[in-house]
Each structure stands twice: as structure tokens, then as C-alpha cells.
Amino acid sequence: MPSSATSAVTPFLAHERSFDFRRTRIRFHTAHDLFSSAALDVGTSRLLRTLAKAPVLAEERGRPLRVLDLGCGAGVIGLAIAKAMPCGTVEVVLADRDKLACAVARRNAAANDLDPSGPQLSVLPAGVGYAAVRAARAEPFDLIVSNVPAKVGAEGLGELLFGAANLLRPGGTVAFVHVTPLTDTIDALARDFAEFHGPIETTEESVGKEHRALHWRFPDGLPDLAGGDALRAWRREDAPSSITFRGAKPMPHVAVHDVEEFDSLHYRTPLLVQAAQQRVPPSPGVERICVLNPNHGFLAALLAHRREPAVVHLAGRDTLSLAVARQNLGDTLRDWGLADRVEAGLAPPHPSLSWLPDRARETGGYDLVIGHPSWKEGRAALETTLRTLAAALAEGGALMLSVGVGQVEGLKKVARRAGLRTARTDTRRKGHAALVLRPPSTEEGEEPSEEAGDEPTPAS
């Protein structure tokens, strides 16, 4: 049975599914806001079929086979290998940049009678690329498996496929699947690698209409291609180096692939800043702000400029977004002369939902928690999210969220179920609204209570 830590993700789960791998039944849950939330996706199925017959799983080594599932999502590839191999013959490590993915993978490990921190299988804390694996001082792997994402850019793909360095043993294999539109990019990356770094042997290949699975063996291992910039492999070269805000100096700007709002402000960002100024009076030099799902950090920087708080913390699931937002916020505070007056960093984690902020004894909570909720979480998860965010507020604090105007009534219903009061009015701009939510102890006028209704309409 799942432990209390792994069962904390229950509101985020979508469907229970199963499949067979090497005559072993694998059970797993999908999650509403993770890749392939309905079922096992076609690409993963193709990769698993190639792995089931792969020689790398049958070779005699005199020691356990070491496997890394990189970008593990719900964990199905790594879990399948760990459960189907005889006990003591394999050691599997799961890693992902999304903190929810890691939590769901731990839950799925427990559902398959695997200890998510044991010798046969372990799920690492979330981190970008190989960062968490290196931080764990992991021993080298014989096999790295991955369903590579489509939106990380060519440099990001190169990092995932060739960036393991000494984490892959000489003669080790990288087995992966990708969507077919990436075929030319990946083939070009392979040619460049072979020309400048060493040979690649293709030991397995399976091509379908939408996906291609490949097993690449590296006889000489992988070179150390790491640079000094932690975000180097994920950077967008087509983004401006600075962003100009109305009434403020340009903000130094690093942009990365696969994180929203990379080259200009979305309408939601100035809307939230305007609404906060109107509805939540600032307290310069004292106020504590937490920004939820900060994207590239524009909202955090604007709030620091307009309100000059004592603290701006960032909270979210995506460690890539947190890393780039933290860098952009820090660079901006230094450039604007605010670094000595505003503390910037990450929010303290909630003990069970580690991507959300929690009331911390040493801080007394936040005066304002503000940002963009994920509408893909599902009704139960959104209610859990709002309850947890409310717990992070200081006395008299406010929660402010941006939604599409068609989602306002749905969010208000979920907020009431979470024990929050909703203001009678909201601030609107270009199809989006900013809502203020408060715990019931506050005095601001709120709408009368209503019975719980349907869940919010998903964003388009």
C-alpha cells in the first residue's frame, strides 16, 4: 500500500492502468497534469517493446544492471524494468524535472511493491536534465532510457542524449523514443556527435507513423560536454536578451525552451500586478510575496519593482522554470539596485506537496501568494492546491490568481470548497481575470456562499 507521503498525490491522479512487460503485470496511475494522462502513450509502448527483447537486459555482468529512467514522468519505463527483472539483478534510478512526476513515480513504485528509495529502485528529487543524478553521486549506468520531450530544442535534446558523460559506462546504451517530426534534428545531432566525439552503434530501431525508438550504444562512452552555465543546453537563441517593462528599466533576460512567456509578457502578468496594487495595499520593506508557477520570472520582477517587498519567493513544480525565473529575478534585482533590499529565493516546501509553499515558523507566512494555477490538475487537485496555498498565508494575507474569464465562476466554487472567501469583484483584461481569495477570518466583502458546482472549465 502507498505510504502517507505517496498517498498525498492522490487528488492529482487520473486513471489506473496496467500493461505487461516481459510477462510481468505493471500497474500504474496517470495524473491529470502529467504527460499522457489518459493511458500509456504510444511512444512509450514502442520503446518498451524494443527493451523487452534488448540484449542489454540479458547480458551477464556479475553485478546488477544499472538503469536510469531520465524524464521518467509517472515512472512506467523504469518501474517495468525494475519489476520484471529478477530480484538483485537490476538497480533502477528514476529522475524528472517535474516535482509532481517524481511524486507520482514514487506512488506508482509503491503500488508495484517496490520501495521508491530502496536498492532495486529509487526516485530522485526533481532536477533539470542530469542535475539530480549528479547531485546524488550516482554510480555509472549501463542503460539510460528516455521518452524525450519534443519542445526542449536541439541543444536540450543533445543534452539528454549525449550529456550523461561519466554517468554512462563505456559501451553503455541510451535507449529512447521520439516523435517523428524530430527525426531530422536527432539524425543531425547523431552525425555531429560521430564526427567530433566518437562512434555510435544503433543496436535497435523501431519506426512507426508517429514515433521512432532507437538504442544507441557508445563503445567509447560519452565525453564531458558540460559548460559553466547551468541553463546552457536549454536556452533559446531567438529570445531577446532583455525585456522592457512600462515604467521600469529593461530586465536582463535568459530564455529557455519549454517554459511559457519566454519573449514578452502575457496579458495575465500586468493584470495581476495591476490587481495587486488596487486590491492588496503594498507594505514596502516588510511585505512577503510568493509567486506561484513563475514561468520566466517576469511577474516576480514586476512585483519587486512596483511593491519593493522584503521577500519574493518562487514556488512551482517545474525545476527548469524555477531555475530560469530565479536567475532572471536575481539579475534584475541587481541591475535595478534592489538586491540589498529584496530577498529572492525559493519558497519553503510543503511537507507532502513539495512544489507548494507552506507556512514556515521562521517566516510567519506570506502576505501575498500570487500567480497562475494549473487548470489541468483537475477539480480535486485544484482544491488541494488552494488549501495548501491558503496555509502559506500570514494573518490577513491574500491569495491572488489569474484565470480566463470563462473560468471565474468555476474557480470561485472550488475556492469555497477549499474554505476561502471570494471578493465580490475581480479585475479583468483581454479575456483574463485576477481574483482575490482570502481565508474566512478576513473582513473584505465576499460573495455569499453557494453549493459546490461543476469543476472549472479547462483552459483552451
Image (cartoon, helix red, strand yellow):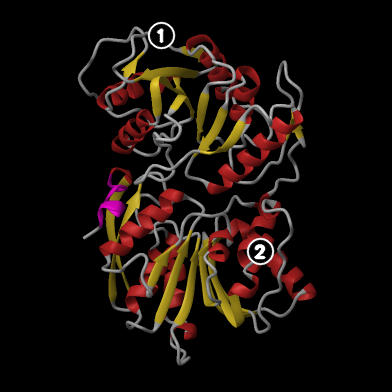
Whether tag 1 and tag 2 are in contact, CB under 8 A, the answer is no
Main secondary-structure element of the magenta-colored stretch: helix
Residue 353, relative to residue 429: is it above or below? below
Name the one closer to the observer, 267 or 322. Answer: 322
Q: Is residue 251 left or right of residue 291?
A: right
Q: Name the residue under label 1.
A: 425
Q: Could you tell me how far apart the alpha carbons at marks 1 and 2 are, in whole angstroms?
A: 51 Å
Q: Is residue 166 left or right of residue 21?
A: right
Q: Which is in the foreground here, disc 1 or disc 2?
A: 1
Residue 67, relative to residue 72: is it above or below? below
Q: How many C-alpha atoms fall within 10 Å of the one at disc 2: few (<14), some, or many (≥20)?
A: some
- Three-letter amino acid code at disc 2? Ile
> Which span of residues is magenta-colored?
3-10
Name the one closer to the observer, 173 or 448. Answer: 448
Q: Which of marks 1 and 2 is nearer the N terminus?
A: 2
Q: Mark 2 points at which residue?
A: 186
Residue 423, relative to residue 77: is it above or below? above
